[in-house]
Image (tube, rainbow, N blue to C red):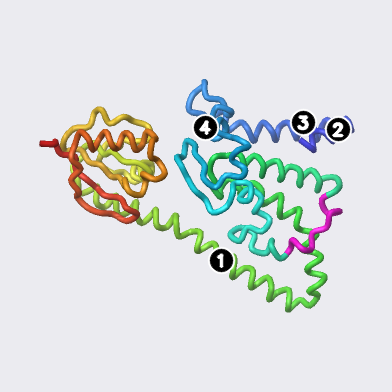
Amino acid sequence: AWVAWQAWRRRALGPLALAVAAAVLVFAPTLLTRPGPELLPVQYPALQEWSLGNFFARTVVGSQGTRTYGVPTLVFALAPPAHPGFMTFGLALLPFVRRRDLARGPAAALALGWLLFALFVAGAPYQHERHLLASFPLLALLLWPAAERLRELVGRPAWLAAALGLALLLQGALAWRALQGPLRAQRLELQAVALLRAQPPVRLYTFVLTEGLRTRGVPQALHDLWAEEPAAARAGDLALFAPERLRPQWQGRDVMRRWDELTARFQAVPVAALPEGFTLSRLEARP
């Protein structure tokens, strides 16, 4: 928007056309990949549930269920300049930031863009670190003058190399820690796939794991309790679910309602226990 405004003021048609083309390129994937022609970007649940009330909330309720976080959403959204998992050295640079770094020209536009983006993220009814990723290229540019001041203060190349090496080691450790969640999810999927390939090709009612199981080619017909009513369930079908783990977040939502309806009609007989609270069960007729 800043580039377009400056180009319009100077009647520079080339940069203006470039800014318009960049905007089209940014929004085109969303418009072309939407589930249906009636679903516009502003109709997605994350935007429809956006609210100023989420800024200072630690417990938020939305389409992702009920979640409680350690800090208010606004603090989460404004944390990227010192985020330990993405910008380990950012915290050390903050004392070297000067107002003149952000007060003029492109730097002011970048700072305003990051602030508006952070406020947009803060209004969402959940906290997910992938939503912060777009802010880090902007922050790297904004913090560059502070990094130069720190380099001049340290002076000696050996000290600077030692500081950078320590930052890289810390960044690697934090990245490894952040990867533990996805690695646990992958191990769970692999164990579930190995177990399901030994089961008959019946219907399988599940949640969370649906897409991972589908891409790994299990023999069962997958039915996601997020999207489908279990009306077609029959005795002998399978269920892969973690009711105790999922109930606090999804109580009162369609997912738990459908699971409760399924277990009210059938007895879920455990076949095998899996990590993260998941159990593979066979649905049997109630006496």
Q: Quadrant of the C terminus?
A: top left
Task: Please state if 98 lies on the left or on the right of 285 as rendered.
Answer: right
Q: Residue at x 18, y 32 (%)?
A: 234
Q: Residue at x 73, y 74 (%)?
A: 160
Q: Residue at x 61, y 61 (%)?
A: 84
Amino acid type for the residue under numbered disc 4: Pro
Residue that badge 1 annotates:
172
Residue that badge 3 annotates:
17
Tag 1 near tag 2, CB within 8 Å: no
Instruction: Give the CA separation, mark 3 to mark 2.
Output: 9 Å
Q: Residues within 10 Å of mark 1 (few under 14, many from 20)?
A: some
Locate residue 69, reporting x and y percent.
52, 50
Q: Which mark is residue 45?
A: 4
Tell me: residue 183, above or below residue 107: below
Task: Please state if 27 lies on the left or on the right of 97 as rendered.
Answer: left
Q: Nearer the viewer, residue 225 or 24?
A: 225
Residue that badge 2 annotates:
12
Which is nearer the N-term, disc 3 or disc 4? 3
Task: Please state if 242 lies on the left or on the right of 28 as rendered.
Answer: left
Tell me: residue 39, above or below residue 242: above
Which is nearer the N-term, disc 3 or disc 2? 2
**Front label number (3 vs 4):** 4
Instruction: Give the CA separation, mark 4 to mark 1.
Output: 35 Å
Q: Classify mark 3: helix, strand or loop.
A: helix
Q: Residue at x 64, y 69 (%)?
A: 167
